[in-house]
Image: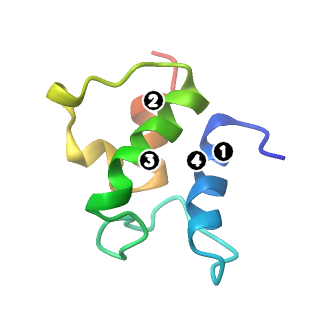
Amino acid sequence: MASTGIDEVRAWILRRHPARTTLPLDENLIENRLVDSLSFVELVYAIEGAAHVEIDFDTIDLQDFQTLSSIEKAFFTIA
């Protein structure tokens, strides 16, 4: 079971790619096709559920979704 929100997001991605067992924080999710245009919306919902936030689709910055590290910084780090 995931211990933190970012671990929940990592687990969500790994469930979609059963051949993978690890996912480094700095791996580019989009360039490596771990998240594509069809699964991007689902990724946003997974982040919302894990971080208990609402993400406004009108103000999405794709840079915030490139890696687990950028997701963690954008949605799981308390300012």
Task: Report the amino acid beneath label 4.
Answer: Val
Give the left or right position of residue 59, taking residue 48 as reference.
left
Residue positioned 51% across, 26% down in the render: 77
Question: Cα distance, mark 1 to mark 4?
Answer: 4 Å
Residue denoted by label 2:
75
Labels 1, 3: front one: 3
- Which mark is first along the chain, 2 or 3? 3
- Which mark is first along the chain, 3 or 1? 1
Figure colour scheme: rainbow
Task: Report the amino acid beneath label 1.
Answer: Glu
Task: Report the amino acid beneath label 2.
Answer: Phe
Give the left or right position of residue 66, taking residue 26 as reference.
left
Circle 3: element type = helix
Circle 2: element type = helix
**In the rendering, at what x and y percent does residue 30 appear?**
31, 66
**In the rendering, at what x and y percent does residue 52 appear?**
56, 20
Q: Residues within 10 Å of mark 3 (few under 14, many from 20)?
A: some
- The answer to which image quadrant residue 44 occupies is top left
Question: Cα distance, mark 1 to mark 2?
Answer: 13 Å
Question: Cα distance, mark 3 to mark 4?
Answer: 8 Å
Residue denoted by label 4:
9
Q: Residues within 10 Å of mark 1 (few under 14, many from 20)?
A: some
- Which mark is first along the chain, 4 or 3? 4
Labels 3, 2: front one: 3
Location of the C terminus by quadrant is: top left
Residue farthest toward the top in the current orientation of the protein = 79
Residue denoted by label 1:
8
